[in-house]
Image (cartoon, rainbow, N blue to C red):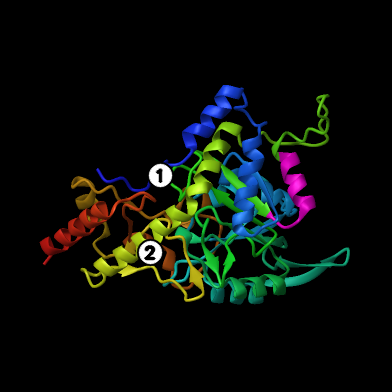
Amino acid sequence: MIPLSIPQLEGNEWKYVKDCIDTGWISSAGSYVNQFEQMVADYAGAKYGVACMNGTVGLHIAQILSGVTQDDHVLVPNITFIATLNAVKYTGATPILVDVNADNWQMDLDLLDSYLNENTIGKEIEGIPFSFLKSTGKRVKAIMPVHVLGNMGDMARLVEICEKYHLDIIEDSTEALGSTFNGKHAGTFGKFGVFSFNGNKIISTGGGGVIVTNDKDLADKAKHLTTQAKVSAMDYIHDEIGYNYRLVNVLAAIGVAQMETFPKLLENKRQMDAFYRQELEGVGDIVFQSIDEEVNPNCWLFTFKTSKMRDLLAYLNENGVQSRPFWMPMNQLEMFKEEIYVSTENVSSKIYDTSISIPSSAGITLEQQKTVVETIKEFYKTQE
């Protein structure tokens, strides 16, 4: 079976993990944690990085530090992995689901701007302007754009919209390490960006995340909250409710080794994407996710649309090519069915019904890619 997306461990991973074991520094204290979080921040062009257990808790902490409360709304795309919505619910806030663009599958900015213009009213609290949703009276505090599949939307316009409506930007960049818009890295357009290093991501620590920001006070606060809000190096004194969210040293050691090889892995991903697009162009009714000219994506997980998605999915998995359907839209999940959904054409549902992800590991070989392509072509021949 050619796997969907697995890590490529070919550098100093074992050497650094062995160092942790040999020295006994395997938990949240240790030099690799600090090294890893700064490597990620430096790569993204951010000043500070804070390592955490995974991307989900990173999004949770970023919202807390943005002042999101149970009395607020947070805007999120309707097409995303469920972790985005779960993180909103952890704060007690109420999500507003926004449909996505039919071409690039990112949050539909025309829809977003129109909705905010028609449905919010501006008010000041202690001299600070905010937008409030007319129908609920709740403040619309933040927006979490998700760089779906490592692609990006028009971030310049998104920033303009957020400035107009006084929204904090918390970028869900969990899939987007290595992706840029006009040369600026994902995760650096707002107050916070959050990256994930789950086993299926472009690089992996097994499980892990990094919060990035350019604000030192916020970075210090994030580190404080993720380490149980402990204020004394000696005594067990804590000054607020904290979280046991800190990444452990042995996983950060893997992350350091992965970051060392990341440029090569990123290039592998982009070559894979180019190969699939070239070889699958015009095959059956396949339609690719579009990429805006300002965007240079990391090509994390190759996904395309076809009306024969379910049949192709079964055929590929039966013939040794591991493939998966796309995420179910958030408004179709039982726990989010009653949330506000901003949409005119329900693009999310159409994408879900037709999209399939195919093998995209950072270490996928050319021979494996050729096998994937030939298997897909064989399927469409059977449909003629």
Quick check: can you spot residue 246?
Answer: no
Quick check: can you spot residue 163?
Answer: yes
Marks 1 and 2, Cα distance to the nearest angstrom? 29 Å
* Quadrant position of residue 190: bottom right
Near mark 2 (Cα within 10 A), the count class, few <14, some 14-19 or many ≥20, is many
Residue sitting at x 50%, y 70%: 295
For this view, does 248 lie left or right of residue 295? right
SS at circle 1:
loop
For this view, does 358 lie left or right of residue 63? left
Q: Amino acid at mark 1?
A: Gln
Q: Which residue is mark 1?
A: 8
Earlier-in-chain disc, 1 versus 2: 1
Highlighted magenta segment, given as a residue range: 213-225
Dot in front, 1 or 2: 1
Query: What secondary structure is the magenta-colored segment mainly?
Result: helix
Residue sitting at x 56%, y 23%: 22
Q: Amino acid at mark 2?
A: Ile
Near mark 1 (Cα within 10 A), the count class, few <14, some 14-19 or many ≥20, is some
Q: Which residue is mark 2?
A: 351
Location of residue 84 in the rendering, given as x and y in whole percent from the top left corner: 55, 52
Location of residue 280 in the rendering, given as x and y in whole percent from the top left corner: 25, 66
Residue sitting at x 72%, y 66%: 132
Confirm whether the magenta stretch covers residue 218: yes
* Quadrant position of residue 189: bottom right
